[in-house]
Image: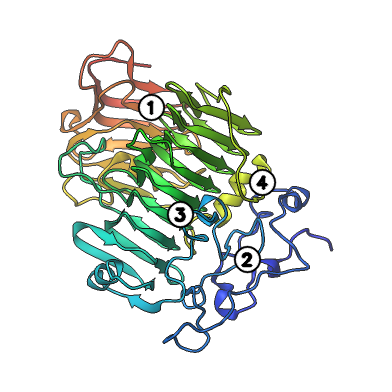
Amino acid sequence: MATGLRLQVLEMANPHDITIRRRTLLSAGLAAGTLASTGLFNEAAPAVAAPAVAAEGAPPGVGPNGFVEAELPTKRGPGGFWTVAPEGFAGVASHGRGGTTGGAGGRLVHADTPDQLRVFAKSAEPLVVILRGELVFGQYEKLTVTSNKSFLGAGEGAAVVNAGFKLVNVANVVFRNFTVRDSYIPGDFVGKRPDNDRDGIQMDTSTHVWVDHMHFTRLGDGLVDIRKDCDNVTLSWNVFSDHNKALGEGWTQNVVTRVTLHHNWIRNTHQRNASLDNTAASHVYNNYLENISSYGMLGRNAALLLVEGNYFRDVRNPLHHQGPGGGLAARNNVFDECTGNTGEERGGTFDPPYSYSLTPAKAVPALVRAFGGPLGGTEPALRKVITVALDGTGDFASIRAAIGAIPPKNPAAVTVLVKPGIYHEPSVLWGDRRNITLAGATGNASDVVLTNSEGVTLLVAADGSTLRDLTITSDTPQPGHVLQLTGRGVTYSNVTVLNGTSG
């Protein structure tokens, strides 16, 4: 019987590579003909593992790039979702370098503790660093990274917790297959505290950086910040979630940065998705943006943007360009349940100096859901009760993080129980969820205060939701709603609304 794709297409030639998730796009609801048109599957040429040519000092069978040792699947050729080299500007020869290879050819080492990761990151020699398990930092730390490094999560479950990476005047760095999470400072959703510079990755004047199949979530400041005249950067197949500021590029008047963003999944975020300021070339294609409450992709000033084949769902102001100069070319994007700006073309554009394969935009959500992020996936499991607390005693420290922990189309009711405190953040119960109860934990509405600096503090779009024992307000009086109800069958009791209206 013809079924389109066969499961073996997702299996690697090396048995260690069978750890790839066996969820096909057919199971995500796409027709076989649509899948075939993506060019991502070729039954006559199944994916193969990286060549097992041993690096000096490495055990037999370990390749020079470390992909076999890290149990990473690979798929060669254009359109592969686990490629052995970056697609986009990180693969372009410039600045005296042929592309981005990270620590390939250097020593292969294992980081099983924060101390080991710290030492390897700042070592002067080229290294392939394999991360295993969760590396939890007792106090937040931004690790200094030097040139010619690869950081590879081994198999499923690798994570760096309460730390980030800082690249200053370096070149040739690769990050793949692990999660960077949980450096959030409770109560500082806007990231304005003087001690809050807790980025996942922060780059200054650095070139040839490839960030691939990573997950960044619940951090203090930006998830990834590309700053101060960086160049040749590719962010591919990553997941950015449950946060305020996702991706920022800029902090300079110089128009030099060239960046490629492709097949990333940005969800349940607020702003900078991405914010691209004064980029010489930003190529943004085949990304999936959903559940974004402030704005999606924004070109600023002299930035040149080529935005094609992206899928925006439930995004406020999904695509825009502002400021003098620059240009925006928007091609074949899909805007589903979006409001606001949808990308009026302006100015000039550019032709990417590399080959790439475009996925049809309608196929992007299922594709990125199936293969984005580290091995093992990033979608949450259903839980019936989720607790939020500013003092560290809850499951999460922000309401946004708690909502992000509810799977879309959740099959059962979920209660988000909020412990006493002032939660300063814009909160949304998204329309792709349902039957959510958001409740203060004490039964006293004045104990749990949700507030925001401007606009709507709480938007309830989830059908069948209940609000209970809360105060919804704003920092200053608002002329409109601070509590907005758009879902069907929403009820509330013992809810106090201040400094604005509800409806």
Q: Residues within 10 Å of mark 2 (few under 14, many from 20)?
A: many
Q: CA distance from mark 2 to mark 1?
A: 42 Å
In the displayed image of the protein, which residue is found farthest to the bottom? 60
Q: Residues within 10 Å of mark 1 (few under 14, many from 20)?
A: many
N-term mark: 2 or 3 = 2
SS for callout 2: loop
Kindly identify the amino acid type of the residue bearing the numbered disc 1: Leu
Residue name at image x 16 percent, y 33 percent: 447
Q: Nearer the viewer, mark 2 or mark 3?
A: 3
Query: Do the CB atoms of the residues marked 1 and 4 lie less than 8 Å apart?
Result: no
Residue name at image x 70 percent, y 48 percent: 30
Q: Nearer the viewer, mark 1 or mark 4?
A: 4
Task: Note whether 123 is above or below 303 in the view shown.
Answer: below
Kindly identify the amino acid type of the residue bearing the numbered disc 3: His
* Residue that carries the numbered disc 1 in the rendered image: 459
Image quarter of the C terminus: top left
Query: Do the CB atoms of the residues marked 3 and 1 lie less than 8 Å apart?
Result: no
Query: Do the CB atoms of the residues marked 2 and 3 lie less than 8 Å apart?
Result: no
* Residue that carries the numbered disc 2 in the rendered image: 75
Q: Which numbered dot is residue 358?
A: 4
Q: Nearer the viewer, residue 21 or 458?
A: 21
SS for callout 1: strand
N-term mark: 1 or 4 = 4
Residue name at image x 63 percent, y 73 percent: 12
* Residue that carries the numbered disc 3 in the rendered image: 95
N-term mark: 4 or 2 = 2
Task: Note whether 487 is above or below 101 in the view shown.
Answer: above
Q: CA distance from mark 3 to mark 1?
A: 47 Å
Q: Is residue 494 left or right of residue 16?
A: left
Q: CA distance from mark 1 to mark 4?
A: 35 Å
Q: Nearer the viewer, mark 3 or mark 1?
A: 3
Q: CA distance from mark 4 to mark 2?
A: 16 Å
